[in-house]
Amino acid sequence: MSLDLTGKIIQIMPETNGVSKAGKEWKKQEFVVETFETYPKKVCLSTMGDKTNDLKKFTVGSTITASLNIESREYQGRWYTDVRAWRIIEGTGQPSSNEPSMQQTQTARRPEPVGDPMTADQETTDDLPF
């Protein structure tokens, strides 16, 4: 599964590294991105190997678009999910155009309620439905 996520970097964690059982060195770095949706979401992404160098081009507050893979794996009866960025590029920083601005939302008026067209000709003095 491959997805793209655009947002602002709000935190970059320190790089971690180690040596695998096979004797190969590895390095990993995690970072948190906040989306530009109506209800922003925070997503923790990780990079592995040489891709950690791509992350070093950006700082907290940078707008990015990350191509990512989501994968889950089981270990001793528990499941772990990894959201791994395999490409990080500079984003546009523009929220989608279909979201109303704060000013539009505050000045928008609700439409007036419309009466039931079936009873429009009947004159009622009581608003009870029975």
Image: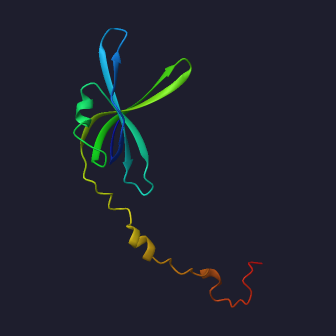
Q: Residue 3 versus residue 130: which sits nearer the camera?
A: 3
**Any part of residue 127 in sight:** yes
| Residue at figure coordinates x 53%, y 81% from the top left | 112
From the viewer's perspective, is residue 53 above or below residue 9?
above
Q: Is residue 12 left or right of residue 127?
A: left
From the viewer's perspective, is residue 114 above or below residue 12?
below
| Residue at figure coordinates x 54%, y 17% from the top left | 76
Say which quarter of the image contains residue 122: bottom right
| Residue at figure coordinates x 31%, y 23% from the top left | 27
From the viewer's perspective, is residue 56 above or below residue 115?
above
What number of labels is visible?
0
Q: Position of residue 73 (x, y in %)?
A: 46, 23
Q: Quadrant of the N terminus?
A: top left
Q: Is residue 71 left or right of residue 85?
A: right
Q: Residue 74 versus residue 43: which sits nearer the camera?
A: 43
Q: Residue 96 versus residue 30: which sits nearer the camera?
A: 30
Toward the right, the furthest residue is 130
Say which quarter of the image contains residue 12: top left
| Residue at figure coordinates x 30%, y 40% from the top left | 66
Colouring chosen for the image of the structure: rainbow
Toward the top, the furthest residue is 22
Q: Quadrant of the C terminus?
A: bottom right
Q: Position of residue 72 (x, y in %)?
A: 45, 27
Q: Is residue 37 left or right of residue 90?
A: right
From the viewer's perspective, is residue 16 above or below residue 98?
above
Q: Position of residue 106 (x, y in %)?
A: 45, 73
Q: Residue 36 versus residue 96: which sits nearer the camera?
A: 36
Q: Is residue 125 left or right of residue 20?
A: right
Q: Position of residue 38 (x, y in %)?
A: 42, 58
**Any part of residue 1 in sight:** no
